[in-house]
Image (cartoon, helix red, strand yellow):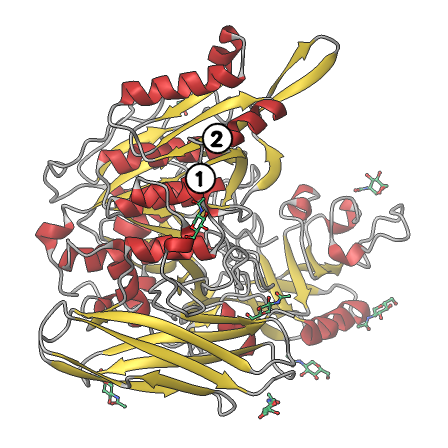
């Protein structure tokens, strides 16, 4: 019922497979990606290598030609082809091949939000440098006619830009705001493909990052204000990979190959799917090569919370973003004939044009011929009698199939919800979710009244002081791939966000809905990811030469605490809520070096070809010095996973910080930890005498065996009285 946005992996292979008969046995070719690592010197030699590799396993030259889908040669070396199982096996055995993996489908997972994050319109900016920043958005394309994409005041694209604008179909072209637009549709058969956004998602995410400031934006009067991106002067390059049925791995990889080569400064992907090992995932592979070229990739964490182990896009070179709620909520007033009034939940753009409407309940309007085991209160397809619903508002319980009540002539629905959702949703008719206790009173009123009546008013906004809090849908750790890295890294607003939309998609995306506009209010980690991408671009506009890990560290160590925290959410918010203005001056940064990544991958069990990605020569993990800690990366957060409640708690972290604050400064360690843990920092004071000086320290965690907790949260803050450089320390018992 609630539409939460993030484009996730369907467990079906790409539609591209085709059958071919060989003798008597039918074998099915399926789309695979063959990843070879660094791009060779020339495109010609890469293409030839791909051809030779393919021919060596697909013996028939004609079939080899036909089975090739993509050659990726610009930013890394890989190809996509339709392969048989035995061909996949032979390619895996080839020493030049890093990985071979099936192409899967991924799915898509305003502007109060920037003010809420402490970035008012008047915030200090480097307009000149900001307008040289290009953010690559891999999504559903762009609806360039939305006001957010106007290019008033922007000069021509930065000279480093090498991308293109594919003018096709109804996509009329780019401007100085959206400087590039490409589409990738080899994963799907799409009639008349173009970069035009027919979904709204890509326009929403792009405008959240870098949309121009537009006063008076709203969804039918709701959330009225100035809509703007985090960096309104920056440029947008869109890479459309998601279509009506999802986003194919082979297309995502093609988009990343182009984007890195086109000259984007940052990448934002609000999409994902099942996590798999880093070199069998196109987003992790693309982000890895982006990182090596100095480009930070920001990704959504997924909308599968609040369960553990649901976080996606967990590669350590990715900035993984969960979602929080803002201080603004939408409430929808419901009034009943006997005077009962209640403030419900939903985003209702419809104003009543009568004082009251007839009211019934699902139990009274039940379709007499439904099976005994079907519960009419759920108001799902076929459960009600159209004659008893027509012209009325219906009281339902728990859920509502988006357009059913409208289809059978109903005018609205009041839904009793035992658990209040933290997300407002839009419907094709007036709808409000209300508390169960009040719905019982309303049901009684309907039972006892000859002509019961009710009205659902248009939503209004209310302030919610208890924010930020983690959205219930936001995916949580532990990290299913690496048990030494805390993910998600950070959180940002992702509930009820107003931003640009496409006029080609209705407000609810339902065919019955005739509300179309250039703004919409939607929720998801898809919406929180572009807030962090915008914040990263903002930091980069002050520090154009910072590495991706420096920008990531700055955002993480300056993040603010959540208002609502509990044991359960420790694995949901990472370092906390982004604070873009503070991130510009973090004091110290945790930078990650190439040797860190090699040690990390060795610890994770990667060998041989995968490690050549860093060294251009075979690396023997036995010769990589072990620093003795649990974790190998100089990560801005610390995560300790325990596997036995009868063992004492014991962990050690090694970290190095670089001074980017005041040349001469003394930082003191401030530890916050539950009484049962002993957290020691050695040394507990760091004295710097110049900028870019590095200092190392260790964090030792000790505690008795604990069998009464599943997770514990602590923190380390380095404080020089001007800067607070804070890292979360999270413990989790994986038993
Ligand atoms: C372009 O838009 C027109 C009018 O909405 C529509 O009829 C046509 O099918 C569209 N063409 C393409 C290629 O999408
Ligand atoms: C009532 O239920 C029957 C059996 O499921 C179904 O065939 C019929 O279409 C339903 N009536 C309405 C009005 O939905
Ligand atoms: C609903 O009623 C139950 C039982 O009377 C009570 O415990 C609960 O607090 C009520 N909930 C609200 C939201 O008022
Ligand atoms: C309303 O009436 C139905 C049918 O008589 C009954 O089962 C139900 O408990 C009543 N609801 C309330 C809240 O009194
Ligand atoms: C890696 O180094 C270890 C110890 O130096 C040695 O025993 C091992 O044979 C080496 N492995 C390879 C594949 O070279
Ligand atoms: C539990 O953790 C210890 C210490 O990290 C490790 O040596 C051991 O192999 C782990 N056991 C299991 C079953 O994972
Ligand atoms: C868990 O047990 C430890 C050690 O026995 C104790 O200090 C701590 O207070 C307990 N925590 C909770 C949440 O009960
Ligand atoms: C840490 O630094 C902040 C300034 O960023 C200062 O206000 C605060 O008092 C410091 N805390 C401690 C305990 O020194």
User: Which quadrant does the C terminus fall into?
Assistant: bottom right
Residue 310, given in percent of the width and then of the height, sits at 56, 57
- Identify the residue position indicated by label 1 in the image: 282
Report the image quarter containing ligand 3.
bottom right
> If you read the primary sequence from the N terminus, does the residue marked by circle 2 or circle 1 appear first?
2
Label 1 C-beta lies within 8 Å of the nearest ligand 1 atom: no
- Identify the residue position indicated by label 2 in the image: 33
Q: Residue at x 77, y 58 (%)?
A: 377
In this rendering, does residue 354 appear at all?
Answer: yes
In this rendering, does residue 522 appear at all?
Answer: no
> Does residue 36 sit above or below 108 in this rendering?
above
Please give the count of numbered marks on the rendered protein. Answer: 2
Residue 134, given in percent of the width and then of the height, sits at 21, 44
Mark 2 crowdedness (10 Å alpha carbons): few <14, some 14-19, many ≥20: many
Query: Dots 2 and 1: beta carbons under 8 Å?
Result: yes
Residues under labels 2 and 1: Cα distance?
Answer: 9 Å
Q: Quadrant of residue 668?
A: bottom left
């Amino acid at each position: 019922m609630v539409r939460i946005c993030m484009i996730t992996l369907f467990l079906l292979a790409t539609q591209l497979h085709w059958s071919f008969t060989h003798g008597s046995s039918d074998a099915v070719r399926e789309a695979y990606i063959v990843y070879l690592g660094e791009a060779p010197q020339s495109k010609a030699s890469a293409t030839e290598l791909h051809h030779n590799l393919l021919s060596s396993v697909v013996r028939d030259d004609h079939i080899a030609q036909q089975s090739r889908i993509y050659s990726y040669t610009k930013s890394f070396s890989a190809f996509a082809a339709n392969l048989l199982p035995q061909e996949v096996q032979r390619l895996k055995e080839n020493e030049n091949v890093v990985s071979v993996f099936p192409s899967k489908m991924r799915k898509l997972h305003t502007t109060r939000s920037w003010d809420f994050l402490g970035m008012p319109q008047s915030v200090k900016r480097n307009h000149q440098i900001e307008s040289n920043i290009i953010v690559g958005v891999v999504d559903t394309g762009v609806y360039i006619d939305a006001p957010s994409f106007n290019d008033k005041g922007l000069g021509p694209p930065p000279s480093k830009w090498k991308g293109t604008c594919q003018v096709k179909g109804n996509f009329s072209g780019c401007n100085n705001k959206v400087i590039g637009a490409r589409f990738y549709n080899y994963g799907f058969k799409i009639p008349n493909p173009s970069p035009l956004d027919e979904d709204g998602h890509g326009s929403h995410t792009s405008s959240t990052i870098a949309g121009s400031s537009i006063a008076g934006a709203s969804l039918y009067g709701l959330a009225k204000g100035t809509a703007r991106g985090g960096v309104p002067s920056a440029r947008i390059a869109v890479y459309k990979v998601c279509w009506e049925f999802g986003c194919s791995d082979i297309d995502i990889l093609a988009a990343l190959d182009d984007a890195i080569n086109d000259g984007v400064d940052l990448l934002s992907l609000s999409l994902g799917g099942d996590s798999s090992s880093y070199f069998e995932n196109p987003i992790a592979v693309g982000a890895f090569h982006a990182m090596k070229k100095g480009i930070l990739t920001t990704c959504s964490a997924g909308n599968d919370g609040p369960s553990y182990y649901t976080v996606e896009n967990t590669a350590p070179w990715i900035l993984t973003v969960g979602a929080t709620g803002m201080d603004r909520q939408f409430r929808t007033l419901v009034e009943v004939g006997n005077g009962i009034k209640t403030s419900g939940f939903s985003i209702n753009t419809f104003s009543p044009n009568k004082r009251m409407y007839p009211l019934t309940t699902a139990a009274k309007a039940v379709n007499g011929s439904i099976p005994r085991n079907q519960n009419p209160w759920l108001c799902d397809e076929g459960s009600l009698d159209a004659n008893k619903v027509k012209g009325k508002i219906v009281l339902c319980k728990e859920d509502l199939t988006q357009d059913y009540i409208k289809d059978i002539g109903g005018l609205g629905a009041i839904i009793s919800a035992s658990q209040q959702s933290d997300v407002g949703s839009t419907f094709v008719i007036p709808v409000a979710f209300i508390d169960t206790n009040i719905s019982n009173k309303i049901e009684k009123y309907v039972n006892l009244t000859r002509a019961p009546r009710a009205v659902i008013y248009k939503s209004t906004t209310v302030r919610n002081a208890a924010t930020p809090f983690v959205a219930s849908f936001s995916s949580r750790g532990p990290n299913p791939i690496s048990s030494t890295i805390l993910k998600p890294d950070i959180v940002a607003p992702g509930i009820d966000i107003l931003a640009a939309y496409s006029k080609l998609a209705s407000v609810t995306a339902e065919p019955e809905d005739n509300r179309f506009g250039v703004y919409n209010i939607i929720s998801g980690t898809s919406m929180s990811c572009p807030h962090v991408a915008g914040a990263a671009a903002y930091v980069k506009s002050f520090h154009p030469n910072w590495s991706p890990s420096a920008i990531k560290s700055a955002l993480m160590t300056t993040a603010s605490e959540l208002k609502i925290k509990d044991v359960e959410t420790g694995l949901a918010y990472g370092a906390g809520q982004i604070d873009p203005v503070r991130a510009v001056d973090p004091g110290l940064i945790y930078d990650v070096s190439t040797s860190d990544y090699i040690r990390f991958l060795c610890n994770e069990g990667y060998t041989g070809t995968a490690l050549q990605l860093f060294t251009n020569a075979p690396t023997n993990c036995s010769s990589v010095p072990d620093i003795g800690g649990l974790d190998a990366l100089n990560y801005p957060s610390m995560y300790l996973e325990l596997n036995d409640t009868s063992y004492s708690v014991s962990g050690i972290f090694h970290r190095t910080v670089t001074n980017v604050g005041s040349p001469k400064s003394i930082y003191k360690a401030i530890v916050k930890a539950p009484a049962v843990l002993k957290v020691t920092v050695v040394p507990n004071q760091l004295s710097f005498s110049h900028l870019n000086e590095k200092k190392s320290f260790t964090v030792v965690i000790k505690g008795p065996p604990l069998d009464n907790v599943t997770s514990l949260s602590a923190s380390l803050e380095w404080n020089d009285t001007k800067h607070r450089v804070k890292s979360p320390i999270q413990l989790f018992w994986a038993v």
